[in-house]
């Protein structure tokens, strides 16, 4: 009995001891560490798998500035839109079990979800949603400002307007990925969260991964952003209202398993989680992405761009590349596969202050394995980033001067007050409080409105992070026709005052 116990403990302990693998080539490790230090990133986790082996699942730096906790292979990060590959995988396991088909219609599975266009409402399929080819306007981030829940998100679908003709190209949509997740949940007769936990994450052996909500664990990275040129921690966002598009939390150890599964046709350590046929479907081009010569040169794309099912499908220096990024919670992340090389790479970092540096790190790793010399790409990118930061500093200073010298608007403040309604986003309340104009988006963000010119106002957000990041947001309010218009991050908001 003692011998059996010792054998059992050995089998159990050995994999745990080897979880945080680090066999990274020394020259690559040195180059990455230098780049991370030069850019001043608080913490980074890096994953490299090759030929079904984990080369590295390790960390650099700290989980939170000012605190001693180090990032390691088990540090949890919010992987945001990498979640889309899990939602597609959830659909795949249901396709494999005969519970769902890629071309099942939304109207047959979720009849309560309505669309503005009768043809789209009748014909739109799971495949359309997973490949971003409905053509409907994106509305990708505004729901965060308005404080929506998932039920409201699904109800909003009927108000999404066409941005391009149906199935003619890619329009990226977090809201419609949420519909895709709810389709899979309905087919499986459970919740999306439970489907992903039990049919994808658990069979893949991803024991650290949390689905839907940020886990309460000690070894978790804290998001950061830059305030007046200095990085500091920010509050984590909750994206559970669009969980199927952006709500998985994982670490380097588990992400290594995810990359191995993707590179090995759905097989991981003897368990066939997803069939080879479904893996090929997810990794095949479904929607062509228009590219420019500038874009191809910047990304080293020689052929074409496309979106599969939960994955971008392109090439990198002529090598087939499957990849995706995420950037929703102060934690930019990047995941890439070179299937012919059996190589998988992931980069997770915990700050918004360094732009697309996660992609720079991933490119350095891919180049190393493709035999491309490790030139000072990071240094060149850092110079351009610093120039962009300086331009932003000047813009902020200019806007601050304009706010301080603001003149009264052309009409009395009371003329701008009212409840402005948009079908897609709901109510926007503009009011006069203590002699100042204020605005609230639904039940969410609040702001002061400071006059700029004519009937245009700067939006001075109460939320500290939004005040810093979305400092140049403006709103136009026309008292005569009762129209309110605002470009909010990447989404356009247009509303009319209630009578």
Image (cartoon, rainbow, N blue to C red):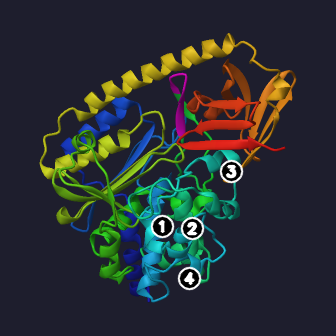
**Residue drawn at x 66%, y 62% as measured from the top left:** 150
Label 4 to label 1: alpha-carbon separation: 15 Å
Q: Which residue is mark 1?
A: 129
Q: Is residue 318 visible to us here?
A: yes
Q: Is residue 25 visible to us here?
A: no
* Count of numbered circles on the image: 4
Quarter holding residue 42: top left
Vertical position of residue 449 compared to residue 423: above or below: above
In magenta, the rendered stretch is 224-230
**Crowdedness near tag 2: few (<14), some (14–19) or many (≥20) residues, C-alpha within 10 Å:** many
Relative image position of residue 258 (x, y in whole percent): 38, 66
The stretch drawn in magenta includes residue 455: no
**Residue drawn at x 17%, y 57% as measured from the top left:** 319
Q: Secondary structure at mark 4?
A: helix
Q: Main secondary structure of the magenta part?
A: strand
Kindly check if marks 1 and 2 are in contact, taking CB atoms under 8 A apart as contact.
yes
Sequence-first tag of 4 and 1: 1
Q: Which residue is mark 2?
A: 179
Q: Which residue is mark 4?
A: 187
Q: Which residue is mark 3?
A: 425
């Amino acid at each position: 009995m003692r011998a059996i116990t010792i054998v059992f403990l050995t089998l159990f302990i050995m994999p745990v001891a080897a979880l945080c693998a680090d066999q990274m080539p020394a020259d690559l490790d040195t180059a990455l560490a230098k780049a991370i230090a030069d850019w001043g990133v608080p913490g980074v986790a890096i994953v490299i798998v090759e030929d079904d082996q984990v080369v590295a699942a390790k960390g650099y730096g700290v989980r939170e500035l000012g605190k001693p906790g180090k990032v390691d292979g088990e540090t949890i990060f919010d992987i945001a839109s990498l979640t889309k590959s899990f939602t597609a995988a959830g659909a795949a396991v249901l396709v494999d079990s005969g519970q769902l088909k890629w071309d099942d219609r939304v109207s047959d599975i979720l009849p309560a979800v309505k669309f503005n266009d009768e043809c789209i409402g009748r014909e739109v399929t799971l495949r359309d949603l997973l490949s971003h080819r409905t053509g409907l306007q994106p509305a990708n981030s505004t729901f965060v400002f308005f404080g929506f829940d998932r039920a409201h998100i699904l109800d909003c679908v009927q108000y999404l307007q066409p941005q391009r003709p149906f199935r003619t190209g890619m329009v990226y949509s977090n809201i419609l990925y949420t519909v895709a997740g709810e389709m899979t949940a309905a087919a499986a007769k459970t919740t999306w969260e439970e489907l992903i936990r039990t049919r994808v994450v658990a069979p893949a052996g991803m024991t650290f991964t949390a689905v839907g909500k940020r886990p309460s664990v000690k070894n978790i990275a804290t998001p950061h952003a830059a305030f007046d040129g200095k990085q500091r921690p920010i509050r984590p966002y909750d994206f559970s209202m669009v969980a199927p598009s952006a709500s998985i939390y994982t670490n380097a150890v588990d992400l290594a398993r995810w990359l191995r599964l993707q590179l090995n046709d759905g097989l991981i350590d003897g368990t066939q989680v997803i069939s080879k046929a479904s893996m090929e479907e997810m990794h095949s081009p479904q929607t062509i992405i228009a590219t420019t010569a500038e874009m191809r040169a910047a990304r080293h794309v020689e052929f074409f761009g496309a979106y599969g099912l939960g994955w971008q499908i392109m090439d990198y220096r002529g090598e087939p590349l499957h990849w995706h990024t995420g950037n929703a919670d102060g934690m930019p992340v990047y995941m890439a596969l070179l299937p012919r090389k059996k190589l998988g790479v992931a980069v997770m970092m915990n700050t918004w202050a360094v732009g697309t540096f996660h992609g720079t790190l991933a490119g350095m790793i891919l180049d190393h394995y493709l035999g491309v010399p490790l030139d000072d790409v990071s240094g060149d990118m850092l110079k351009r980033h610093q120039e962009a930061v300086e331009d932003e500093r000047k813009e902020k200073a200019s806007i601050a001067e304009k706010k301080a010298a603001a003149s009264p608007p052309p009409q009395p403040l009371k003329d701008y007050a009212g409840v402005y309604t948009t079908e897609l986003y709901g109510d926007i309340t503009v009011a006069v409080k203590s002699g100042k104009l204020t605005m609230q988006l639904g039940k969410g963000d609040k702001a002061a409105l400071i006059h700029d010119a004519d009937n245009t106002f700067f939006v001075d957000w109460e939320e500290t992070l939004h005040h810093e990041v979305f400092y140049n947001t403006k709103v136009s309010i026309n008292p005569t026709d009762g129209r309110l218009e605002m470009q909010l991050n990447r989404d356009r908001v247009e509303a009319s005052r209630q009578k």
